[in-house]
Image: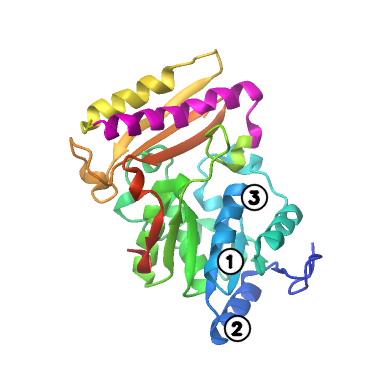
Amino acid sequence: MTGEGERDGHGVLERFESPAGAHAWCTAVRRSGASLGFVPTMGALHEGHLTLVRRAAAENVRVCVSVFVNPLQFDDPADLEAYPRDLDRDAALLAAAGCKMVFTGRLSDFFPGVAGPEAIPRRDPGPCALDLEGAGRAGHFEGVATIVGRLFELVGPGRAYFGAKDFQQTLVVRHVARELGYPEIVVCPTSRDADGLARSSRNVRLTPAARERALALSRALQAARRAFAEGERSVAVLEALLTRELARGDDGTPFEVEYAAVRDPELWGAGGDSAGPTARALVAARVGGVRLIDNLALDEALEGGASKGGA
């Protein structure tokens, strides 16, 4: 690992092992008048992350990336321990994608002077943290909101880029950005492999058979989208379709559906019997012991997009 503030072997990427160094770098960029794009990650980078970095590089003069496996958002210690980590590999990929600075750190570096994780003040993740991911993973979105808010404070105003695969998380992030007044949140379409599987750092843990079975997630979402395009608006019918499609093609691979839901991001917890033009289908399942999530806008024209000031 290169020292703090040193150049990476590519000659273009600065690396900092503490948030303090990253904060100083970002402050200098803004003072120069250059626009700043930010991509927060937990590392184990894949093409989905790099797509975000390339878009940020196309829309900003400078791009920085955080690589931090946030223990506050893991409810399963085994999942935290198993999360892949390889900063040298990640740095090489980031340099090639147009990133100018990458930083990491320990939890205590992000919250100096706080006596342990339990003492870190948690940030309210907002009403969109309820249900689905929020219901099944106690404290997850509180942990996400807490570290994302801290990252936003360190990097400062600019644009922050997120993938739509973690859609409920993007709603939480927008809530945090509204509370702070910055940054601009840019949500990019889900990056997928050629077979339709949403790219995820967890995919490397899938056996060939489990990966094939995992394609049921994207097939179910596409089936719901087709039904919506043909005029189906009943949330109950669309959710039943999702569940039915997830059950198809059972080859004996362990497959546990956690949820198959249709939600309107404008209403979320308020629910509703009819799917409106902004509705999304969302699914989560454990496939061969690996937890995967995916989602799809039922109206394709609304996939992706940006939100000013986290709105």
Q: Residue 252 location in percent, x, y? A: 55, 13
Q: Residue 172 location in percent, x, y? A: 38, 55
Spatial separation of the CA atoms under disc 2 and disc 1: 18 Å
The reply to whether residue 139 is visible in this rendering is no
Q: Earlier in the sequence, mark 2 or mark 1?
A: 2
Residue that numbered label 2 is attached to: 28
Q: Earlier in the sequence, mark 2 or mark 3?
A: 2
Spatial separation of the CA atoms under disc 3 and disc 1: 16 Å
Amino acid residing under circle 1:
Ala
Is 120 covered by the magenta stretch?
no
Amino acid residing under circle 3:
Leu
Amino acid residing under circle 2:
Ala
- Numbered disc 2: secondary structure: helix
Q: Which residues are magenta?
A: 204-230
Q: Which mark is residue 113?
A: none
Q: Main secondary structure of the magenta part?
A: helix
Tell me if residue 166 comes above or below residue 235 in the rendering. below
Please name the residue shown 54% across and 41% down the image. Answer: 192
Is 228 covered by the magenta stretch?
yes
Between disc 3 and disc 1, the foreground one is: 1
- Numbered disc 1: secondary structure: helix
Q: Residue 74 location in percent, x, y? A: 52, 45
Out of 14 and 197, give the one closest to the viewer: 197
Tell me if residue 133 comes above or below residue 211 in the rendering. below
Residue that numbered label 3 is attached to: 45
Tell me if residue 295 comes above or below residue 305 in the rendering. above
Left or right of 98 on screen, residue 71: left
Residue that numbered label 1 is attached to: 57
